[in-house]
Image (cartoon, rainbow, N blue to C red):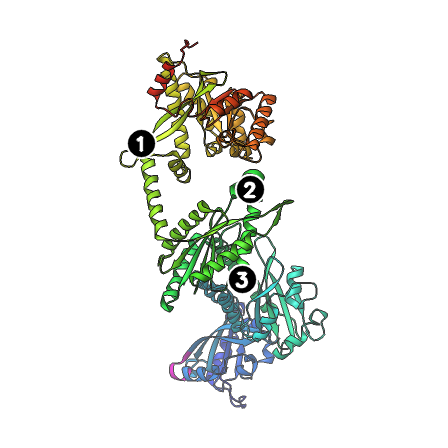
Amino acid sequence: MPALAPPSPGPTSPSRTLLTAALADAPLRRALDASDNAVVMTNSSKCVVYINEGFTRLFGYQPAEVLGRHLSEVLLGPHSDPDLLESIRGNVLAKGSFRTDTLLYSKAGQPRWVSLVINASDESSGGPGGSISILTDITLTKMHEVLQTHVLEGMVNELPLPELMALVCREVERIAPEVTASILAVDAQGRLHPLAAPSLPATISRALDGLAIGPKVGSCGTAAFRNAPVVVTDMATDPLWADYQELFAPSGMRACWSSPIRDHRGQPIGTFAFYFREPRAPDALHQRLVDVCLHLCALAIERNSTHERIHQLAFFDVLTGLPNRALFRSSGERALADLQRGRHTGALLFLDLDRFKQINDTQGHAAGDALLSEVAQRLTQGLRARDLIARLSGDEFVLLLSECTTEQAVQSAQRVLHDIAQPLDIFGQTHVPHASIGIAMFPNDGDTIDTLLRHADQAMHQAKSDHRHSLQLFSAEMNRRAQERASLERALQQALSDRSLMLHYQPQVLSSSPGTLHGVEALARWNHPQWGMVPPSQFIPVAEDAGLIHELTLWLLDEGCRQLAAWRAAGHDVPCVAVNLSGRSFHRPEFAQEISDALQRHGLRASDVLLEITESVMMDARPVTLQNIEALHHQGFKLSLDDFGTGYSSLSYLHRLPISELKLDMAFVQDLTTSATARALTVSVLSIAHSLGMVVVAEGVETTGQQQWLQAHGCPVMQGYLFGKPLPPDEIEAWLCAQAPRPYR
C-alpha cells in the first residue's frame, strides 16, 4: 500500500467534515462493519483514517493500532510481493484504480491471500483525498481453486506422479512461502520413496529412498507408522529426529509437521510434510492447506496405482511378473530397430518346458505354477540389462539377446538348459525340469519380431522331435516343413468339415478260436485327393496341436457306431467296436453325455462299444476327467487301457479305475520269441489282468510263433496282421464271410 509520512495536524477541511459525517451515519457504519470484506480509507497523506470491523476480523488489528499509520507498515510481511507498492502507485496515479491478488500478514503473523481493490478518493467529491481499499480473503479460494485446478488439470493431462506431486509442493510453497513441502510414498513393504521435494536438497531424497517406517523415523516415517499426524516443533531436540539431524542440518530446516496420506481403506500410502526454518508449530492456514492437499495427493497416488495395476495386467504375466507377448512384441521391435541402426546381430530363443503337462496332470496346477515361477527366476538371473524376456503362454518363454552372434546364442542356450535342469523342490517332491530351445538369428532368419518368433518356435518343435532337453537352430528346411504342416492342418479341418475321412477296422480274435471275432478296432484313415493316403501318425498330432482332436474323436465315435449298426442290420456278427478316445476330450464336462448320445442315435447299447483310453487319461487328476470316467462306468461302458506297459504309473491306477481290458503294447509282442525280458513282462501283465478280472488284447501279432506263445500263456484276445490288417467296411464283411459264420444273437 502507499506509505507516506504521518499527517501533520492542520485545519479540518470541508471534505474531511463530509467524510466524518458520512461515517457517523449509523446505518452506513453498521453495513460496513457487517461486511466480510475489509474496508480501509486513507487520506491524501496515504495514512489510514478508517477501518471497518471486517478489517479487524481479517487481520486482528484494532482501529487504534492502525489509524494514522501507513497500511504497508501494518500488512506487508516477509513473503509479500516486493514490487507491490510500486505497482499500486503507478496504477492509481495513471488509472485511478488498481486490482490484484497478493499475500499479506495478520497481526499474529499469519499469511492471508487477499483480493485487493484500490480506488482513488477525490476530496472534491467528499472523499478523504487518498484512497478506499477493499480487501477480500481469498486464502481458501487459492487453496481450492488454484491448487485443485492445477492438480486436476495435471491428472487429466497424464502428468507422471512425481511431476504432479512436485506441482502440489510448488503451489503450496507459493500460497504459504514460509513452508517447504515434501511428499513421500509408502510401499506395501512399509518403505518410504520420495515423490517430490523440489525445495529440499536432492541428497535428502536419495537418503530417504527405501527407508523403513517406524516409531522413531523422523516426522514422516513415524507419521506413516502411526497412521497419524506428527508435529515436531524443534527437530534439534525431538527424539524422533535423533538419527536424522545430521542429514537435515545443511538444509536449514528446524521444524516439521507430517501427515499420513491415506487410501480409500484408511491405510497410509504416503506422507505430506511441511518443513519450517524456525522452531514453530503449524497454524490454521497450514491446517487448511494440508486438508486440501491430503485429499489431492491420495487421489493422485491411488489413481497412479490403478494405472500401474492396469498396465501390469495388460503387459505383464500375473504368475511370473515377466512381460507378456504384447509388451515383448513392442519392446522387441524397438530393440530390433536399434540393432539394425547399429548393424548388429541378435538372437531370439524360444523355450518350452519338456513334459510340463505331466506335472499339471499328476500334481495339480499349483505345482505347475510353482515350477513356472522358478523357471522365470532362473531365466531372469542370467539376463543382461540390454536383453529382453517374456512369458508368452503356458510353459513358453522367449529371450531376445541383443548384439549376439550365432555362437554366443548357442552358448547362452546351453547355459539356460543347464540352469533350468537344476533340481528343485515342489511341495516336498524333487523335480529336475528340462526344456527345449529353438534359436532364430536376426537378421538372417527374420527382421521382425513376428518372423523371429515363428521361426524360433519351429526350431523349438524340431528340438523336441529330435531329442528333448536340447537346442536347435532355425533352418530354411524347417520353415518348409512348417509350411507343409500348416497346409496339412487346413486340409484336415476341411476334411472334418466335409466328413471325407474314413474308418478302417482291424479284427480282434479269440486266442482259443482265431476265426472267431472278439470285436473290431476303428482306425481313422485319410485319403487326400492330392497327397493320397495320409498316415495317422502324421495327421493325428496335427489334430491335437490344432485343437481339432475332439471334433475328430466325436466323428470317429459316431461313424464307428453307424457302421456297427449297419453291419448288424445286414446280418453280420460284429460283437463290438473299439474306439480310441482323445485324452483332451475328457476335459470337457459334457463328454460322457456326448458318447451316450452317439449310441442312442444309432440304437446301440453301452456294451456294443469299447472305449480305449491311454495312460495319460488314467493319470489325469482333473476332477472333470474323473467325473467323465465315473459317468461312463455308471452307464455300463467298458474301458480299455491302450498301449499298456509302456508307461510308468499304470499299476497304481488299475485298482481304482473301471478298466475292463488291457491292450498289451506291440513292443512286447514283437520280442516274445527273442527276448526273455519281454516274455517275463508279458507273463506279469497276463497275471495282473487275470487276478483283476480283466481281458488282455495282444497287439501287433504277426507270426505264428507269437500266436502260439500267447495261446500257451493264456492271452485271451489277439490283434495283428496275422489275422487281418485294418480293412474298409466292405472287406471286413468279406473277412467275416471267410470265417465260419454263426448267426448273430
Kind of residue at badge 1 = Asn
* Whole-number angstrom distance, CA of label 3 to CA of label 2: 47 Å
User: Is the residue marked by circle 1 packed among few (<14), some (14-19), or many (20+) residues within 10 Å?
Assistant: some
In percent of width and height, residue 28 lies at 50, 70
- The C terminus - image quarter: top left
Asked whether, in this view, residue 58 is left or right of residue 548, the answer is right
x and y, in percent, of residue 706 in the image = 49, 25
The 10 Å Cα crowd at callout 3, few under 14, some 14 to 19, many 20 or more, is many
Is there any visible trace of residue 54 in the rendered image? yes
The segment highlighted magenta reads 92-97
Residue of label 3: 297
Instruction: Give the residue type at disc 2.
Output: Ile
Residue type (three-letter) at the residue carrying disc 3 = Cys
* Residue denoted by label 2: 359
* Residue 174 tag number: none
Q: Position of residue 172 (x, y in %)?
A: 53, 70
Which numbered marker is on residue 527?
A: 1
Q: Earlier in the sequence, mark 1 or mark 3?
A: 3
- Between 712 and 112, the one lying in front of the other is 712
